[in-house]
Image (spheres, rainbow, N blue to C red):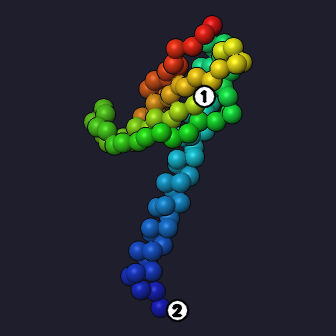
Amino acid sequence: MHIELIDIVIFIIIGLLGYLWWDANAVRELALSHVKAYCKKYDVQLLDQSVALNKWRIVWSQGQFKLRRQYQFEFTSTGEARYNGSATLEGSNIIDIELSAHHI
């Protein structure tokens, strides 16, 4: 069996892509759990039971580079109208959760 350098590079790239996909799913699930708790605390209902990645960027925070992700979700307070919310995570730490203005 003969392994060339290009084979090793391809394996490393595939492994890196797999890790990034796994990490993105883990952070999305973490965001979802924080959003569910936040919605429960403020007595609103999370719609579709999901969050969606809206944007991401690399930031310098506390002496290191981190990935800041912003997720969007929809919620309702009355059961009739849908409102938007967002959750921001830096690495795996929740930074902020915001609910748009809504009826109580």
- Tag 1: residue type? Glu
- Is residue 46 in view from this perspective? yes
Give the side of residue 24 with respect to residue 80, left or right.
left
Which mark is first along the chain, 2 or 1? 2
Choose top left, top right, bottom left or bottom right for residue 6: bottom left
Give me the disc on residue 29: none
Q: Residue visible at 68% across and 33% down?
A: 49
Residue furthest to the bottom in view is 1
Q: Circle 1: is it few (<14), some (14-19), or many (20+) Cα within 10 Å?
A: many
Check disc 2 and report its element: helix, strand or loop. loop
57 vs 14: above or below: above
Q: Circle 2: is it few (<14), some (14-19), or many (20+) Cα within 10 Å?
A: few
Labels 1 & 2 near each other (Cβ < 8 A): no
Give me the disc on residue 74: 1
Give the side of residue 8 with respect to residue 101, left or right.
left
Q: Give how far across and how far down residue 31 sits, in percent.
A: 56, 33
- Tag 2: residue type? Met
Give 102 or 50, whichever is nearer the viewer.
102
Distance in Å between CA atoms under marks 1 and 2: 54 Å
Q: Which residue was labeled with disc 2?
A: 1
Q: Residue visible at 36% across and 42% down?
A: 57
Q: Give how far across and how far down residue 62 sits, in percent.
A: 30, 32
Q: Residue visible at 41% across and 42% down?
A: 56
Q: Which label sits in the foreground, 1 or 2?
A: 1
Q: Residue visible at 42% across and 34% down?
A: 90
Check disc 1 and report its element: helix, strand or loop. strand
Q: Give how far across and how far down residue 75 sits, in percent.
A: 63, 24
26 vs 83: above or below: below
Q: Give how far across and how far down residue 7 sits, in percent.
A: 45, 80
Choose top left, top right, bottom left or bottom right for residue 12: bottom left
Give the side of residue 8 with respect to residue 62, left or right.
right
